[in-house]
């Protein structure tokens, strides 16, 4: 059976033009998929999670009941992850954290959290990816390596496509890469500027000064870059974790946001974060519309409080403040610093995930689910905020993340009404 | 749901010509009924009974308001809203979270709210948020005034008609919205348009052509609500001339000019900005146009509009943080926090103009109350505005605390005071009528049983800020200004009676999008409860 216009639930590009051939509930071939995506689709059955309690396989109902029991007794639970699931599951996860008086955080806090903090200070001059395709004659990738991390970004959105006002495609566009090391992306660039590690803030601030017409003694390459940025017709600065997770973090992002904002006194310029997990943007969106805040939220007082550095996952775990962790569609053991992730094996950790992971290895309860975008429908938000409907192409014996979370929420409520 | 009988109330139901009569209202099966075998009788002796409020223009859901929320944690910190046994937690400053938005509208007796500016590419997002707003029915208007397809087919009316119909259906929208037509598109290159006849830097269409095309298409499609227009040159000193020209151009036609206050300025700079509300009101009186006021409220606000070049201008004026987002081939938008100050001559004049419009446009069926929430202020300020309209003494007291320039408008000389019947008109009867929602805004047999019951109080603002009872689709949901049961309303969409297919060249046009046309239309899964209103 052939599925067309399939949306890829892998990275923040959310390419929606895939074709899949499915036979006997397996993807046997893909069209238009990048290497990362193809490998994901062709290996969907590898490493599937099984329903486990204390490492022993059991039925999914028993796992959900066990999870409800643990969660209901929690003093201060953490709900975490949610970057690789759809928005209904994210909505239900917020409801659960609120109901429990716990904390909720997404992987935003370990990738583009600094971006959010920067935006909250400065604002953000941005655009959708199609605006870059249609208008940009200059694209600057800063601390970002799309060839490896977002393989089709350059061909679908930012470098080669021909758009409404960019009929010449690649020929009409300059690509600049600023990074601390050579990458596959820097090799494609018309200009590569290699920075010393830890000097992003300085470079961005210098560019801003140059654009304001100040005379400073600086690397001539940066001077030329400033000139190019000022004189393009429509520019875009796309930045990755090379900027957000290097020395300076949100100060780097502030400098980039300010630079792009000020460029708009000379031309049109936009800035976009290159977000990784396919729906980490959705987690920001859902948390924000339900609570006002995008990540690192605490409900222990009955209302949402915002506290990056206080209620964010690394801090709550490192300070051993939570007694139960509910991990949804995420693998913190592989991605968090050891002093935070090691605590997960000391407390009651429950994992809701279609796949086995390092976290599911240490969890007390593992609840396998139907994978969003493969075996469950739902909404995902692209890195530029465009909402796209995920498709269901394979059947799964398990319920979706959303369905499991509904059961848990209802179970907690039922338990309370029995108690009272 | 049980049947209800509401007895002894003083009823204001302007659509049915009822102006303060003691009448009993019967509710059965969620509708107003001739007679109900009610087990439950609510005695509202001495209270005022009105249809549930209908807000025609309030930014409550979608990418812009959510970006505003994300931008301003400082705005939420002072306004936490705890969960209760029946309600969700959230925040309630000027950018309230979705749940709190629904609760606050309901507490004021509002039961229908329209989100007025949705980029079609982001419509799914708007619907997701609408689904998280409890207590009210809702719908959304679709941004079209800067759409590249329409711009490039501006003289091909049949094509535009087909496309607009397809787009409304794809976005599951309720009305056509145009914001700074052509100006926001020109902003994609850092420019704006000034005057109705100016062309863009990269295209041939003019604002005048865009407005007339969309209003003609609106008429051909027999849409329930007229073209909803945020016209050009908004916020600019001296813009009243463009506004008069726009009104002249639309004379005899159906159109709704939104937050008109921002388009009534005389003068040539911020220093000599003055009110031209009188001339504008006269022109409106002389037309078929409907308007909403766009009152400004003193204090901190977050401005957000699809008028991206205006937002840039406001950023440059204020130096505050600035968000801009250009949406491929459709529109753009901006966000800037702002503070309206009593002692600022421009802000004080803006405040006066909003009231002048409401008081000088004679027919309450054609001028509606709004703050362009959250732009001019929060929707929670409506009771304060109602008090200003009903109480000239209060109005004069407020005026005396403002910069003197507010007193050089005609406001000090206006003695008109709104009656309760007129308030019911501008906040529910007339707005429901303008929206073409036949089961809303009145208490006639067959109408949706959305009912607001207010305590008759000396202080009008207090009376309208906390309804004694609110009934939504026949269920009692508010008691003494508090939510007593949570309930989710429906979303209004349009019924075109036939399948709507895009023209082949719309498919061709999608090469300028980064989303496939097959993945573009909003699925019905996003409207779990809906009512499709027939066009025609
Ligand atoms: Zn508005």
Image: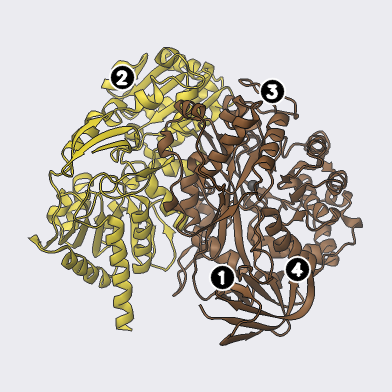
Chain colours: A yellow, B brown
Using residue A226 as the reference point, say whether residue B480 is left or right of it: right
Residue topped by disc 3: B199
Q: For the point 39% across and 38% down, which residue is it?
A: A383
Kindly report the distance in space between the C-alpha atoms of the residues bearing marks 4 and 2.
Answer: 71 Å
Q: Is residue B227 above or below residue A52?
A: above
**Dot placed on the residue nearer the N-terminal end, 4 or 1:** 4
Kindly report which numbered mark, 1 or 2, lies closer to the viewer in this rendering.
1
Q: According to the image, label 4 marks what residue?
A: B16
1 and 3 marks in contact (CB < 8 Å) = no
Label placed on residue B473: 1
Of A302 and B490, nearer the camera is B490
Looking at the image, residue B411 lies above or below residue B264: below
Chain that bears disc 4: B
Residue at left offset 62%, top offset 38%: B319
Secondary structure of the residue carrying tag 2 is helix
CA distance for labels 1 and 3:
48 Å
Pick whichever, A359 or B518, lies toward us.
Answer: B518
* Marks 1/2 same chain: no
- Residue B106 appears in the rendering: yes
Whole-number angstrom distance, CA of label 3 to CA of label 2: 40 Å
Towards the viewer: B12 or B299: B12
Q: Which residue is mark 2?
A: A186
Of badges 4 and 1, nearer the viewer stands 4
**Residue A288 placement (x, y as % from top left):** 45, 52
Disc 3 on helix, strand or loop? loop
- For the residues carrying marks 3 and 2, which lies nearer the camera in this image? 3
Q: Is the shortest distance between ligand 1 and the CB of mark 1 under 8 Å?
A: no
Label 1 or label 3, whichever comes before in sequence order: 3
Q: Given this view, does label 1 or label 3 mark the residue nearer the observer?
A: 1
- Report whether B245 appears left or right of B152: right
């Amino acid at each position: 059976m052939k599925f067309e216009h399939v949306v890829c639930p892998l990275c923040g590009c959310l390419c929606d033009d895939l074709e899949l051939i499915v036979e006997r509930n397996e993807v046997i071939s893909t069209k238009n998929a990048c290497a990362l995506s193809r490998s994901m689709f062709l290996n969907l059955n590898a490493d599937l999670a099984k329903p486990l309690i204390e490492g022993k396989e059991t039925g999914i109902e028993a796992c959900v009941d066990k999870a409800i029991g643990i969660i209901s007794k929690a003093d201060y639970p953490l709900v975490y992850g949610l970057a690789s699931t759809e928005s209904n599951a994210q909505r239900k996860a917020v409801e659960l954290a609120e109901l429990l008086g716990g904390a909720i955080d997404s992987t935003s806090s370990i990738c583009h959290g600094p971006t959010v903090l920067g935006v909250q200070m400065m604002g953000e001059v941005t655009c959708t990816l199609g605006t870059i395709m249609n208008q940009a004659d200059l694209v600057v990738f800063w601390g970002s390596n799309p060839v490896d991390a977002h393989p089709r970004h350059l061909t679908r959105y930012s470098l080669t496509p021909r758009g409404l006002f960019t009929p010449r495609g690649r020929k009409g566009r300059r690509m600049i890469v600023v990074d601390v090391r050579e990458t596959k992306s820097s090799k494609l660039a018309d200009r590569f500027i290699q920075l010393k590690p830890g000097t992003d803030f300085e470079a961005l601030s210098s560019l801003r000064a140059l654009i304001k017409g100040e005379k400073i003694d600086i690397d001539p390459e940066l001077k030329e870059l400033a000139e190019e940025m000022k004189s393009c017709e429509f520019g875009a600065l796309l930045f990755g974790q090379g900027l957000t997770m290097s020395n300076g973090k949100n100060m780097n992002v502030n400098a980039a946001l300010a630079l792009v904002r000020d460029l708009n006194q000379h031309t049109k310029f936009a800035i976009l974060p290159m977000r990784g997990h396919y729906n980490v943007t959705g987690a920001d969106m859902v948390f924000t519309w339900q609570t006002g805040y995008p990540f690192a939220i605490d409900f222990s007082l009955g209302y949402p409080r915002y506290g990056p550095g206080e209620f964010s996952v690394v801090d709550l775990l490192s300070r051993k403040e939570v007694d139960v962790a509910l991990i949804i569609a995420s693998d913190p053991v592989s991605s968090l610093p050891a002093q935070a992730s090691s605590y997960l094996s000391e407390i009651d950790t429950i994992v809701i995930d279609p796949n086995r992971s390092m976290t599911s290895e240490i969890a007390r309860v593992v609840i396998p689910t139907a994978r969003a975008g493969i075996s469950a429908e739902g909404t995902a938000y692209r890195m530029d905020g465009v909402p796209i409907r995920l498709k269901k192409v394979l059947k799964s014996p398990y319920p979706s993340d959303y369905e499991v979370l509904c059961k848990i929420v209802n179970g907690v409520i039922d338990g309370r009404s029995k108690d009272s | 749901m049980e049947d209800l009988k509401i007895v002894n109330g003083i009823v204001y139901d302007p659509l049915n010509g009822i102006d303060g009569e003691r009448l009993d209202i019967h509710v059965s099966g969620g509708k107003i009924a001739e007679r109900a075998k009610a087990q439950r009788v609510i005695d509202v002796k001495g209270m005022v009974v009105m249809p549930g409020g209908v807000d025609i223009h309030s930014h409550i859901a979608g990418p812009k308001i959510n970006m505003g929320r994300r931008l301003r944690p400082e705005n939420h910190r002072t306004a936490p809203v705890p969960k209760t046994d029946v309600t969700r937690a959230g925040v309630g400053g000027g950018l309230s979270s979705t749940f709190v938005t629904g609760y606050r509208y309901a507490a004021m007796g509002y039961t229908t709210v329209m989100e007025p500016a949705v980029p079609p590419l982001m419509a799914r997002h708007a619907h997701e948020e609408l689904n998280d707003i409890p207590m009210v029915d809702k719908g959304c208007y679709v941004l079209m005034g800067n759409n590249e397809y329409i711009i490039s087919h501006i003289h091909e009316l049949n094509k535009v008609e087909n496309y607009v119909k397809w787009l409304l259906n794809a976005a599951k929208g309720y009305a056509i919205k145009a914001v700074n037509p052509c100006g926001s598109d020109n902003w994609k290159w850092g420019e704006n348009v000034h005057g109705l006849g100016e062309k863009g830097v990269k295209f041939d269409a003019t604002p005048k052509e865009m407005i007339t095309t969309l209003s003609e298409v609106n008429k051909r499609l027999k849409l329930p609500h007229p073209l909803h227009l945020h016209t050009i040159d908004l916020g600019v000193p001296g813009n009243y001339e463009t506004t008069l020209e726009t009104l002249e151009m639309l004379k005899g036609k159906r159109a709704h000019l939104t937050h008109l206050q921002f388009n009534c300025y005389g003068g040539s700079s911020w220093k000599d900005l003055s009110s031209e509300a009188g001339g504008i009101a006269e022109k409106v009186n002389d037309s078929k146009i409907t308007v909403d006021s766009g009152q400004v409220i003193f204090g901190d606000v977050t401005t957000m509009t699809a008028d991206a070049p205006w937002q840039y201008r406001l950023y440059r004026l204020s130096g505050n943080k600035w968000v801009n987002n250009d949406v491929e081939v459709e529109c753009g938008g901006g966000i800037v926090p702002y503070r309206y100050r009593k002692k600022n001559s421009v802000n004080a004049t803006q405040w006066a103009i909003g009231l002048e419009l409401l008081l000088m446009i004679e027919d309450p069926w054609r001028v509606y109350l709004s703050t362009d929430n959250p732009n001019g202020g929060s929707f929670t300020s409506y009771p304060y505005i109602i008090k200003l309209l009903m109480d000239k003494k209060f109005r004069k007291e407020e005026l005396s605390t403002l910069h003197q320039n507010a007193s050089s408008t005609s406001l000090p000389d206006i003695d008109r005071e709104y009656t309760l019947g007129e308030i019911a008109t501008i906040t529910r009867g007339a707005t429901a009528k303008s929206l073409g929602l036949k089961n809303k805004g009145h208490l006639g047999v067959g109408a949706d049983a959305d009912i607001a019951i207010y305590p008759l109080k000396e202080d009008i603002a207090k009376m309208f800020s906390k309804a004694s009872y609110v009934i939504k689709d026949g269920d009692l949901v508010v008691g003494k200004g508090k939510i007593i049961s949570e309930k989710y309303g429906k979303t209004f969409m349009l019924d075109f009676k036939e399948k709507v297919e895009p023209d082949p060249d719309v498919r061709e046009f999608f090469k300028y999008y980064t989303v496939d046309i097959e993945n573009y239309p909003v699925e019905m899964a996003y409207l779990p409860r809906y009512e499709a209103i027939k066009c025609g």
